[in-house]
Image (tube, rainbow, N blue to C red):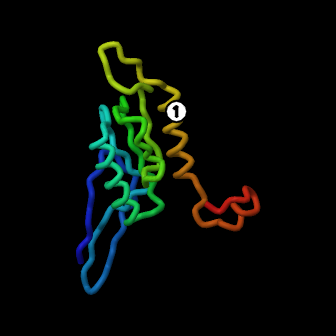
Amino acid sequence: MKINEKDQDFAIYRTILIKADGEQKLINVPVVSIECKTYIDKTMLEGSIATAEKIKNGNPYCLFLVITECYDVSLDVDPAYSRINQIYVLRKEKRKSKNSKPIDFEVVKDLFKFVRNHLERDWSNIEQKLIKEGKIL
């Protein structure tokens, strides 16, 4: 049995025992996966997009986040259509300097709420979501 594994900076996961063809293996299936960066440039963003793709191929329900202090990517590059769910920029600035802004607690609070909502979500009750919200996903 060959299972690809990927270390992440932070993950909330469930340990699962897989049995197949007389073999068994314990794996950690992420529900939330977070990459932490001091800053992110275009090359690092491309690496994060590739990692998000791999993780979501293994578990499409996994929330994939990037947390960075500064965002040093051209604003012409739009990661909206990648498999990254959100990029949080803690200092709300493009480049870190000696006069950097402090970490914004509102960004941290939003991150916490986003993860909490994902973890508390009712994954299987599609009918209730349809009736209550008019949305399936």
Q: Residue furthest top?
A: 99
Residue 20 in picture, x, y percent from top left: 30, 82
Q: Quadrant of residue 51?
A: bottom left
Whether residue 33 is situated above or below residue 75 in the rendered picture: below
Q: Quadrant of residue 41?
A: top left
Residue at 26% in and 70% down: 3
Whether residue 32 is situated above or below residue 14 in the rendered picture: above
Q: Which residue does the numbered mark 1 point to in the structure image?
A: 109
**Which amino acid type is shown beneath numbered disc 1?**
Lys
Left/right placement of residue 62 relative to residue 69 reads right
Residue at 72% in and 63% down: 130
Q: Which quadrant of the figure contains the C terminus?
A: bottom right
Residue 76 in picture, x, y percent from top left: 42, 39
Total marks drawn?
1
Residue 101 in picture, x, y percent from top left: 41, 18
Residue 16 in picture, x, y percent from top left: 36, 67
Whether residue 86 is situated above or below residue 73 in the rendered picture: below
Q: Quadrant of residue 56?
A: bottom left
Report helix, strand or loop for mark 1. Answer: helix
Left/right placement of residue 87 relative to residue 96 reads right
